[in-house]
Image (cartoon, grey):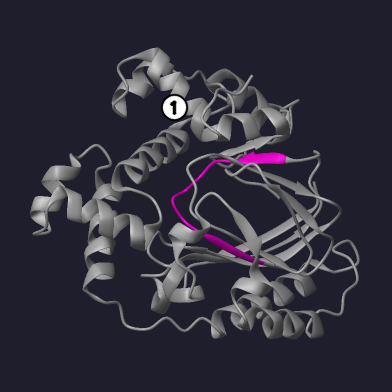
Amino acid sequence: MEFTYVARRPEALAPWVESVWFARGRIDYRRELIAPTGSSVAVVVLGDPIRLVAGDGAGFVARGGFLLGPHDRPVVNEPLGETYCVGVVTTPVGCRALFGVAPAAVRGRVVDLLAAWPPAADLRRALLADSKTPTAEAATEVDQAKKAEAALDLYQSVLAPGEPGPAVRRCAAAVAALEEDPLRPIAGLAAELGVSHGHLDREFTAVVGLSPRVLSRILRLRALLAAIDVYGTVDWPGLAAAYGWFDQSHFIRDFRRHTGVTPSRYVAAQRAAFTPDQAAPGFVPETGVDVKSVQYASRGGRAR
């Protein structure tokens, strides 16, 4: 699998940006499911189109770029050729600050980035003008690394968030607390922040696009996936209990809701497609997953 992926987290943008990344190459499988992270993702597409299916079940073919809103179900990512794009993964509070888009308005959806965020059109033109190598295969490793860094610099240069208001600061503090301990009670967290449980729920949903309880479940599953060695023996009952699941049927239901597949199928998919150095938590390479079943699950049913 010839694939270049370079990512960074700009310190000056740390409250808003989890990573700015560059990706170019071809994957060895048709498509993949990507588990939610609690963030939004804004991608400028410079090469072949990418087809995505998000939580609302609507397919979207991105030709110039896409904005993926916060979501709590897996997203189908299907490159229609060579992947060549530059993207930003926001922090949970970063969507509106960076792109001027209310996260609740794009929850579980994929929309056209160039329409949602006007600076994206000029950014894409500048990125294309700076790209002179026709294919990833034709670029030397040094050339590709230089192009990746230049593209990251360019994307990063157009991100200009303003100063956060009290609601955003409070929600950022809540996110940090949940990242540290996703099992903590939301009512207790609200009290620590000096607001009622209901107030935090409403404010958090407006700023993040997800409720605190939904984000806490996502963070628990992210931590669990990061703890899995897919090439070793996985103690599923012990691992589930460590992250707050004491009922196996409840754990499997939440796991499938998060990744689109069962725990055993998740491990099998990663082993089949990735070498140990390629495996990344939350990615499920195509192993017979039916897009229709994912759409059905995203509407509240169960994937077949």
Q: In this picture, is 77 found above or below 252?
A: below
Q: In this picture, is 71 found above or below 93?
A: above
For the point 42% across and 81% down, the residue is: 161
Neighbours of disc 1 within 10 Å: few (<14), some (14-19), many (20+):
some
Q: In this picture, is 131 found above or below 199?
A: below
Q: Is residue 236 left or right of residue 106?
A: left
Disc 1 designates what residue? Answer: 254
For the point 73% across and 28% down, the residue is: 290
Figure quadrant of the C terminus: top right
For the point 14% across and 44% down, the residue is: 187
Q: Total of numbered circles in the picture?
A: 1
Percent position of residue 3, x then y: 76, 54
What residue span does the magenta drawing correspond to? 32-43
Q: In this picture, is 220 found above or below 62?
A: above
Percent position of residue 184, x then y: 20, 40
Work out whether residue 198 can be spotted: yes
Q: Of helix, strand and loop, which one carries label 1?
A: helix
Q: Give whichever of 294, 156 is nearer the camera.
A: 294
Percent position of residue 91, x then y: 42, 62
Q: Is residue 237 left or right of residue 133?
A: left
- In the image, is residue 37 part of the stretch drawn in magenta? yes
Q: Quadrant of residue 50?
A: bottom right
Q: Is residue 282 left or right of residue 135?
A: left
Percent position of residue 189, x then y: 15, 49
What is the three-letter code of the residue carrying label 1?
A: Asp
